[in-house]
Image (tube, rainbow, N blue to C red):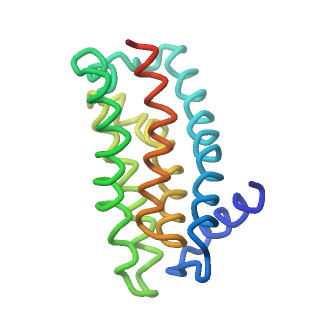
Amino acid sequence: MTKLFESIFAYIKNPRPKHLKHTSFEQKFGIVLQCVPLCLLIGLGFGVLIAIIEAAGVYSSDTHAMNKLFEEKPAIYIIFTAVIVAPIIEELIFRGPITLFNKKYFKIAFYFFTLLFGYVHIFNFEITPKIVLLSPLLVAPQIVVGIVFGYIRVRLGLVYSMLLHACYNGVIVIPSVLLMS
C-alpha cells in the first residue's frame, strides 16, 4: 500500500492523462481494493477532526442530510442510493469528463472537478454562515478521497473509479444502516 500511496501522492503533484497500459483486470481490481482502506483512513482522519470540532460545540451534525435520510427512508433505499446510484452518477459527472481535456488543461480540469465534487457535498448540511466558514474542513474528506477516485479514473478507467466509490460508500453506509435499523 505504501507504493500505491506514493504513486497517488506523486500524481497529485502533477496530474496527467496517463492511463496504465498492459494492466489486467485482476491487477486493476487489486489496485482498487488497495485504495479502499486508504480512502477509509483518509475519511477516518478527517472524521475524527470534524468530531472534535463538533464536540467542542463549534457546529452540530444534527441537521446533516444523512440523519434525515436514516429517519425517512428504508435501509435498502439508503444502501442502493449510496452504494449504486451515487457512485455511478457522481463518477460520470465529476470524473467522467476529466480525460476529455487535452494535456494543456488537464491539470486544471482534474483539480477543478475534484474541488467541485467535494464542495457539492456541502449541500448535505443546512447552509448557515458557520457551515460556510467550516466548509473547507467539512468537505475535506470528499475532496481528498475524490483525488484518489480521480487517480483511479485516469489510471485505470471510469468503471474502476465507480467501483472504488461504491466500495468506499458501502463500507461506510452499510454498517451505519445496519446499526440504525
The residue lying at 43 percent from left, 59 percent from top is 114
Q: Position of residue 66 (x, y in %)?
A: 33, 26
Which of the two residues, 147 or 108, is positioned nearer the viewer here?
147
Q: Which residue occupies the extreme right position in the image?
A: 2
Image: 172 above or below 57 = below
Q: Which residue occupies the extreme left position in the image?
A: 72
Image: 10 above or below 1 = below
Is 158 situated left or right of 20 in this image? Answer: left
Is 39 situated left or right of 85 in this image? Answer: right
The residue lying at 50 percent from left, 80 percent from top is 17
Is 116 situated left or right of 17 in this image? Answer: left
The residue lying at 35 percent from left, 38 percent from top is 82
- Is residue 34 in sight in this rendering? yes
Which of the two residues, 12 or 80, is positioned nearer the viewer here?
80
- Is residue 128 in sight in this rendering? no
Image: 177 above or below 5 = above
Count of picture labels: 0
Q: On the rendered image, what quadrant is the N terminus found in?
A: bottom right
Q: Position of residue 177 (x, y in %)?
A: 40, 21
Image: 142 above or below 176 = below
Q: Position of residue 132 (x, y in %)?
A: 34, 36
Q: On the rendered image, what quadrant is the C terminus found in?
A: top left
Q: Position of residue 116 (x, y in %)?
A: 35, 56
